[in-house]
Image (tube, helix red, strand yellow):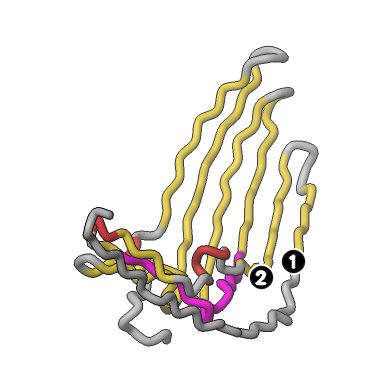
Amino acid sequence: GSGGSCQFLPVVVEPVTVENAYDNFLPSLNLRGRLTDKLQLRLAASRTLTRPDFGQLSPALTVVPGQLAASQGNPGLNAILSTNLDASLEWYFARSSSLYAAAFHKRVNTFIFTRQTPNVTIGGLDATGAEWAGIRVDAARRSSASTAQEESECAIDPPSRCRSPSRSAS
C-alpha cells in the first residue's frame, strides 16, 4: 500500500417538511370599448400569483470549496402576489397604421431575493413589496404584407417609489 489513510466523514441528512396552501382568489377583468370606428379603449384589472421555483425552495446547502462559497434556498418562501391595472387608448388612423398610449400600475406585496455576503449566498428571502407605474406610447405602420415599422417610448416611475426590505409596508 501507499501508507496513506483516507477518512470518510458521515453525511447527515435531515428531512425537511414544509406545507404551504395557496387558496387565493385571482380575478381578472378585461374590457374593450369601441369609442368610434377608429378609436378604442381597453381596460384591464387582475390579481396574479407567482410561486417560488424549486431552486429557491430547496433547503439543500450547496458548497463550492474551490471558491469558498455556499448557497441555500428557503422552503418557507411566500408566493408573490400582485395587483395590476392597465388602460390603453388605440387610434387606427390608416388601414395598417395605429398609434396607442397605455398606462399601467402594478403593486407587488412581496419579492424573493438572494442576499450575498462575503463567501456566503443566502437564497430565497422575502422582502416587502413595491409599486410601479408607467406610460407607453407606440406607433405601428405596415408598409407591405411582410414589413412592419414600430416606434416605442416608455416611461416608468423611478425606483425611488420601491420600498426597501428594511422598511415596513405602509
Quadrant of the rendering where the N terminus is positioned:
bottom left
Figure label count = 2
Magenta extent:
70-84
Specify whether residue 68 is painted magenta: no
Residue 6 picture location, percent across and down? 30, 65
Residue highlighted by disc 2: 47
The quadrant where residue 79 appears: bottom right
> Which is nearer the eye, 110 or 75?
75
Instruction: Say which residue appears at 60% left-offset and 71% top-offset.
Output: 83
Specify whether residue 80 is painted magenta: yes
Residue 124 has which mark? none
Residue 27 picture location, percent across and down? 75, 71
Where 98 falls versus 106 (above or below)? above
Residue highlighted by disc 1: 28
Residue 78 picture location, percent across and down? 55, 78
Residue 161 visible in the displayed image? no
Residue 41 picture location, percent across and down? 71, 51
Q: Earlier in the sequence, mark 2 or mark 1?
A: 1
Where 156 falls versus 145 (above or below)? below
Residue 120 visible in the displayed image? yes
Residue 148 is left or right of residue 128, and the answer is right
Find out whether the residues at labels 2 and 1 contact each other: C-beta distance under 8 Å. Answer: yes
Residue 108 is left or right of residue 163, and the answer is right
Instruction: Say which residue appears at 73% left-offset and 23% top-offset.
Output: 95
Residue 42 is left or right of residue 67, and the answer is right
The quadrant where residue 130 appears: bottom left
Q: Which amino acid, mark 2?
A: Arg
